[in-house]
Image (cartoon, rainbow, N blue to C red):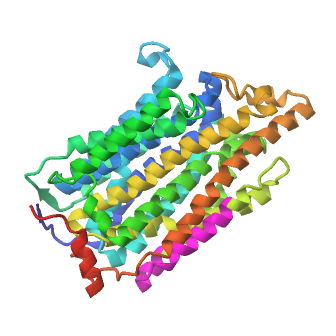
């Protein structure tokens, strides 16, 4: 595989392209969070409280299984066309989500099933957006300078994580939850036009073909695992034939995937990358970060709208402290890395602070004031700010430029799959805890197809209302208790990261004698 080098990219062009990339990343992250404040309205319209997490899970699952495919396609055939294709697919999925359960698709149908299916389509496109942005920055900017730009991208991710619920809440309150998806169309159109006309990247030529068998095996295996975590102990008993069958399917397909990846010329997920200690450690950290962060954060708007009585719009505003903590720290850390070239301490600090933040959120109850919950969220946001861009930077600095897309895809994949597992597992914990309580019976939370009727909740007698709110707060608190140990392991693993100097150009990694031996192990086998 060879690359034809384009003319050096001028700083002004990088800034123009960065604007388009920021819009694309905003779209991917925004839609990961925008639906959270609209979910209560969606569930009220379509029913199915026990399935509501699938609206989020389908999106995360779609982006997760497609991430390594998009990353490898970019390595093989050039990132520009591949990236623009992912934007188009994302916009198609957004339009379909907005039409779910309406006459626009030829009949009312089952709105919840349609929405879940179209969210999966949207997620397939989002996987290309997330990995594409990071890989394109890697093409344009050498590792030593990436901290600043990836800090800015992490800041955009922070804004999206809060702007999503805020925008979703405003749209839900004043228009319709459907416009939470339609709003992507004009923004995506701007990004598509800007990047198609102004972005110039190296073009790659290869005689190899994409590893479709490996991609299919990975997709089936990951989907089976997510179904196990989603349905186990909820839809089916853990010892049921359905759960045991899915677990067996996951084991068989993932073992087959590993065997296939060891033999194909261009694997979707190159296994030799994991011989590099930093890459292996940061991949596990990314998984745990996604598990704790995305899994737990989806329950904050639910707590704010039910227990604290906030409107959909206000629940988005109440997440601003989290955004502020993450945004400020991400930018400061990015600039510090660019200036000093050192990064090892940041994921350690981030893991510790995030653990404290999750621990504080376990204290949420009926009597928690909005000021108290805001302070807890600031701590969580600060911890996430130390981790978000450093994990990607370390992953990219561990590989050669030709494997940048695969490495970016793998790092994004592990974070996404962690988020998918977290959402599924924490959703099951929440549903089971609520169903076992008297509050769950009072609000219909334990019944098939039941919804959360906030108006009916407010019409209950004061003592009944207090019992229901207490049950909800207890179930949400249980979710954060489960997130604490995963956040703590992040801090422990971060101690094993080695401080390898950041390269000043997009050449092969500079290495110490010890690192040369490790790089040799991380190189693909000679064929």
Percent of width and height locating residue 280: 37, 65
Establish if 57 lies above or below 371.
Answer: above
Q: Position of residue 420 (x, y in %)?
A: 49, 45
| Residue 177 coordinates in the image, percent (x, y) | 57, 32
The correct choice, above or below, for 277 with respect to 248 in the image is below
Q: Nearer the viewer, residue 189 or 360?
A: 360
Q: Which residues are magenta?
A: 334-358
Name the residue nearer the viewer: 322 or 399: 399
Magenta highlight on residue 345:
yes
Q: Residue furthest top?
A: 107
| Residue at left offset 54%, top offset 57% | 159
Residue under the image location 28 percent in, 50 percent down = 258
- In the shown orientation, is residue 75 left or right of residue 474? left
Within the magenta stretch, is there residue 33?
no
Residue 522, located in which quarter of the rendered image? bottom left
Residue 398 appearing in the image: yes
* Residue 74, position as x, y percentages in the image: 23, 53
Q: Main secondary structure of the magenta part?
A: helix
Task: Establish if 313 lies above or below 446.
Answer: below
Q: Which quadrant would residue 506 be assigned to in this image?
A: bottom left
Can residue 332 be seen from the camera position used here? no
39 over 141 or under it: above or below: above
């Amino acid at each position: 595989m060879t690359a034809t080098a384009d003319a050096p990219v001028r700083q002004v062009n990088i800034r123009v392209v960065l604007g388009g990339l920021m819009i694309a990343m905003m779209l991917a992250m925004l839609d990961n969070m925008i639906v959270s404040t609209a979910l209560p309205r969606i569930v009220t319209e379509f029913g199915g409280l026990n399935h509501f997490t699938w609206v989020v899970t389908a999106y995360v699952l779609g982006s997760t299984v497609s991430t390594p495919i998009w990353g490898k396609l970019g390595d093989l055939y050039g990132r520009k066309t591949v990236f623009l294709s992912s934007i188009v697919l994302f916009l198609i999925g957004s339009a379909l989500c907005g039409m779910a359960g309406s006459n626009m698709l030829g009949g009312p149908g089952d709105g919840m099933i349609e929405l879940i299916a179209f969210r999966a389509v949207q997620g397939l496109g989002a996987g290309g957006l997330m990995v594409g942005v990071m890989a394109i920055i890697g093409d344009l900017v050498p590792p030593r300078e990436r901290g600043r730009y990836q800090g800015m991208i992490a800041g955009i991710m922070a804004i999206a994580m809060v702007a999503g619920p805020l925008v979703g809440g405003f749209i839900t309150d004043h228009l319709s939850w459907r416009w939470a998806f339609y709003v992507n169309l004009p923004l995506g159109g701007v990004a598509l036009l800007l990047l198609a006309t102004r972005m110039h990247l190296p073009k790659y030529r290869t005689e190899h073909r994409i590893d479709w068998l490996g991609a299919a095996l990975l997709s089936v295996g990951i989907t089976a695992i997510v179904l196990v975590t989603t349905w186990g102990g909820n839809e089916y008993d853990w010892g049921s034939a359905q759960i045991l069958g899915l677990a067996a399917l996951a084991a068989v397909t993932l073992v087959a995937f590993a065997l296939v990846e060891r033999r194909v010329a261009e694997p979707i997920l190159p296994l030799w990358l994991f011989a590099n200690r930093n890459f292996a450690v940061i991949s596990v950290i990314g998984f745990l970060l996604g598990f704790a962060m995305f899994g737990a954060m989806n329950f904050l708007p639910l707590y704010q709208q039910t227990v604290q009585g906030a409107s959909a719009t206000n629940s988005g505003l109440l997440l601003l402290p989290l955004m502020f903590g993450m945004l400020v720290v991400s930018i400061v850390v990015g600039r510090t890395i660019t200036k000093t070239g050192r990064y090892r301490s940041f994921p350690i600090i981030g893991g510790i602070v995030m653990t404290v933040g999750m621990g504080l959120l376990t204290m949420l109850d009926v009597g928690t004031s909005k000021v108290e919950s805001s302070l807890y969220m600031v701590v969580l946001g600060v911890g996430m700010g130390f981790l978000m861009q450093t994990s990607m930077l370390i992953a990219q600095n561990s590989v050669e430029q030709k494997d940048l897309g695969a490495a970016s895809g793998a790092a994004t994949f592990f974070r996404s799959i962690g988020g998918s597992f977290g959402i599924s597992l924490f959703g099951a914990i929440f549903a089971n805890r609520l169903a076992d309580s008297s509050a769950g019976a009072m609000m219909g939370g334990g019944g098939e197809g039941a919804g959360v009727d906030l108006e009916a909740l407010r019409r209950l007698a004061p003592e009944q209302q207090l019992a229901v709110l207490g049950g909800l707060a207890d179930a949400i608190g249980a979710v954060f208790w489960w997130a604490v140990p995963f956040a703590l392991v992040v801090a422990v693993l971060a101690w094993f990261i080695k401080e390898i100097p950041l390269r000043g150009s997009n050449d092969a990694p500079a290495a110490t004698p010890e690192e040369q031996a490790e790089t040799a192990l991380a190189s693909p086998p000679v064929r």
